[in-house]
């Protein structure tokens, strides 16, 4: 343990604690968790403030509920009636009792105002009167930070006493003064006074314990009025009263509620103690009287002084060591408190990671169970439309091709065309006929409005499937919503206890994200559907793309068929004599027209496939466009998972370091 108070300014562990406190503040800010504004997390300079506090004495602050015996306790320690005692609230301002410097002729008192100004009272008596709560003076009291009393009391050379306004005071401002002094670490030891009837009151313990959160073994509990109404019964000893010291009694309750804050508990009666001390002053020989010593023991005077002497020593030789020890324990408590806060921050980071992971999982489920089946159904329906329309298209192409052959494929034109082609002066009969067939197909398509009708049907199928998919996603979102109808992505998820498993938060996030994902998708569908309904030009452009692409594909098929048939036909012509050619040309032309019809009819499945491909492509694009909005956040969600997990791991690392540091401080304090 560091043996000298001055060495604490250079203590490496205390320096590390200050640095790590900054890391905790950063993580708490990133986690956006709500903390008490007075939490030690936000106290940036407490280490400097405490270490730089210079005093040769042990500072002892007396706190407790209104009229719990604080003033009486201080009076009994001094052996004089200095502070005013009453069943009603008395102290309205903090009073700091200091030793009078050697050579100073008389006791005096001064006011320290909140702006730092110091003024001197006419006398100590005037200062004590000012401390007493009076309605007319309350504003002045609130404006006064503290009253300093400089007294000729031997005890104050070892103990600097601080008297505070009570908890549950009629003015909240007075109670706040006490809490501020506690948080500002104006004391090394705290004497906490309790009524026997209300010792361990949950409200009192809650308010003060928050301000004492980091203190370890720095609170001496004093149960006052322990002899009230029994002081004239010499057989009664509060230390043997089951109501006080028995199982479930006052002492047990205090130890349970204050736990590690406590260093000890004393059963004390201020009035009896002050009466006995006054007798001893008048009769010094009583100091050796065993019966008198038992009376001092019974009222708690000797146990309290033993507890204080253990800290300061008979001649004050333990003061510095005790102050260092208590500060090291304070550092241990501070480190543990910061570690506990990081436990909450870690759970929050994991909750966020679980939420984003659940969002990704929910979308994967939607893709698998809703979107992909919808995509398959849409393609099946488009395939049905293509199969239904393919016979009409093959018939249209076959008829146009056959009619062109019958009308334009004459013997003379064919022979002249072939002769010119052979001579290199023109196109062949097959090329000429191919151009004519192309033109005939184009006219037939335009006159029949085939592609416009097919495209309208394809758009209708896509619209109906997108509408059904939108409804399916809405239904899924409703099923995934919490039973109470609350939630949503921004809904709060219980953090649980520090160190608790985050599975509960993950489950809650998964339930919420089901509806959030479905709503996001449904909103995207609705937006897209509304946009498309309002933009007929976009539909027309889509139809034109389908029509042109399909027509081009079909024409390529028609050309291949014509070329194949004509190749066979001219091979037969070249093998025949001219007379047979003249005789059989008409019959073979009819056969060519029939073969063209038959070949187109035989290619019906191929035409159906081509119709499907070019109707499915724009429908698929519309589906992907509709999904683009909801999917846009998926990459970001994946990044969030990694980010929050990394922050949770960082919080755990710092938490482990703080826990180890708290252990080191505790070990040093015990040496």
Image (cartoon, rainbow, N blue to C red):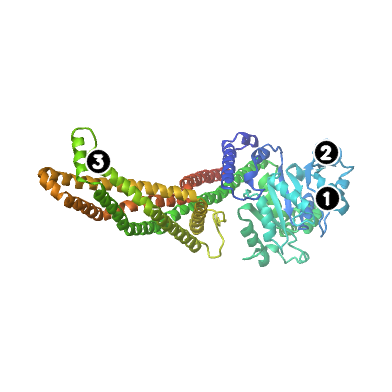
Vertical order, 8 against 559 (above or below):
above
Let me know if residue 522 appears in the view: yes
Q: Nearer the viewer, mark 3 or mark 1?
A: 3
Quadrant of the image for the N terminus? top right
Sequence-wise, which precedes: disc 1 or disc 2? 1
Foreground residue among 506 and 336: 506
Crowding near pointer 2: few (<14 within 10 Å), some, many (20+)? some
> Can you identify the residue that label 3 sits on?
431
Q: Compared to 522, does 105 lie above or below?
A: above
Please tell me how crowded label 1 is: few (under 14), some (14-19), or many (20+) other residues with Cα within 10 Å.
some
Residue at image position (19%, 53%) is 591
Q: Nearer the viewer, mark 1 or mark 2?
A: 2
Name the mark nearer the viewer: 2 or 3: 3
Front-most of residues 208 and 193: 208
Which label sits on residue 443?
none
Q: Earlier in the sequence, mark 3 or mark 1?
A: 1
In front of the other: 651 or 569: 569
Residue occupying the far right of the picture = 122
* Disc 3/disc 1 C-alpha distance (Å): 127 Å
Q: What residue does disc 2 label? A: 118
Calculate the distance from the C-alpha at mark 1 to the C-alpha at mark 2: 22 Å
Identify the secondary structure beneath mark 2.
strand
Residue at mark 1: 82
Quadrant position of the C terminus in the picture? top right
């Amino acid at each position: 343990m560091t043996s000298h108070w001055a060495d604490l300014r250079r203590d490496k562990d205390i320096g590390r604690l200050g640095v790590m406190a900054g890391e905790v503040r950063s993580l708490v800010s990133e986690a956006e968790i709500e903390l008490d504004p007075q939490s030690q997390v936000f106290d940036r300079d407490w280490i400097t403030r405490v270490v730089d506090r210079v005093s040769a004495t042990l500072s002892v602050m007396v706190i407790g509920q209104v009229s719990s015996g604080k003033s009486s306790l201080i009076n009994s320690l001094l052996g004089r009636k200095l502070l005013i005692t009453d069943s009603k609230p008395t102290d309205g301002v903090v009073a700091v009792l200091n030793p009078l410097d050697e050579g100073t002729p008389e006791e005096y008192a001064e006011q320290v105002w909140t702006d730092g100004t110091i003024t001197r009272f006419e006398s100590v008596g005037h200062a004590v009167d000012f401390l007493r709560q009076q309605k007319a003076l309350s504003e002045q009291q609130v404006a006064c930070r503290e009253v300093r009393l400089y007294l000729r009391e031997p005890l104050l050379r070892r103990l600097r006493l601080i008297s505070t306004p009570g908890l549950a005071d009629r003015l909240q401002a007075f109670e706040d003064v006490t809490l501020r002094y506690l948080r500002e670490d104006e004391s090394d030891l705290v004497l906490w006074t309790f009524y026997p009837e209300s010792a361990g009151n949950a409200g009192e313990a809650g308010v003060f314990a928050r301000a004492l959160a980091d203190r370890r073994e720095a609170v001496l509990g004093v149960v006052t009025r322990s002899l009230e109404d029994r002081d004239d019964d010499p057989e009664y000893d509060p230390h043997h009263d089951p109501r006080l010291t028995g199982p479930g009694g006052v002492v047990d309750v205090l130890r349970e509620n204050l736990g590690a804050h406590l260093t000890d508990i004393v059963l004390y009666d201020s009035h009896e103690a002050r009466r006995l001390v006054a007798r001893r002053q008048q009769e010094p020989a009583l100091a050796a009287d065993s019966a008198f010593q038992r009376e001092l023991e019974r009222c708690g005077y000797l146990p309290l002084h033993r507890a204080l002497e253990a800290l300061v020593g008979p001649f004050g030789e333990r003061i510095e060591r005790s102050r260092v020890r208590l500060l090291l324990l304070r550092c241990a408590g501070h480190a543990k408190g910061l570690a506990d806060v990081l436990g909450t921050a870690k759970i929050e980071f994991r909750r966020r990671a679980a939420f984003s992971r659940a969002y990704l999982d929910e979308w994967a489920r939607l893709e698998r169970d809703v979107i992909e089946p919808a995509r398959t159904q849409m393609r099946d329906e488009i395939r049905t439309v293509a199969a239904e329309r393919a016979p009409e298209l093959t018939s249209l192409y076959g008829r146009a091709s056959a009619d062109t052959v019958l009308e334009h494929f004459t013997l003379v034109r064919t022979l002249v065309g072939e002769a010119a082609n052979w001579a290199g002066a023109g196109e062949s009969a097959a090329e000429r006929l191919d151009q004519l067939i192309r033109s005939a197909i184009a006219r037939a398509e335009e006159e029949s409005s085939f592609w416009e009708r097919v495209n309208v049907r394809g758009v209708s199928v896509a619209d109906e499937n997108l509408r059904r998919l939108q409804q399916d996603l809405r239904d899924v979102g409703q099923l995934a919503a919490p039973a109470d109808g609350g939630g949503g992505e921004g809904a709060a998820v219980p953090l649980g206890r520090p160190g608790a498993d985050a599975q509960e938060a993950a489950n809650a996030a998964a339930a919420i994200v089901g509806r959030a994902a479905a709503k996001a998708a449904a909103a995207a569908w609705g937006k897209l559907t509304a946009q498309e309904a309002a933009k007929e030009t976009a539909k027309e452009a889509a139809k034109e793309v389908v029509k042109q692409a399909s027509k081009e594909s079909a024409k390529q098929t028609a050309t291949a068929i014509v070329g194949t048939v004509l190749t066979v036909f001219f091979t037969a012509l070249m093998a025949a004599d001219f007379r047979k050619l003249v005789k059989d040309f008409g019959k073979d032309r009819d056969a060519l027209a029939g073969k063209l019809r038959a070949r187109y009819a035989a290619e019906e499945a191929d035409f159906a496939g081509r119709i499907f491909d070019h109707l499915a492509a724009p429908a698929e694009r519309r589906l992907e466009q509709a999904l683009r909005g909801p999917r846009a956040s998926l990459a970001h969600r994946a990044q969030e998972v990694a980010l929050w997990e990394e922050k949770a791991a960082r919080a755990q690392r710092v938490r482990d370091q703080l826990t180890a540091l708290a252990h080191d401080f505790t070990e040093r304090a015990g040496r």
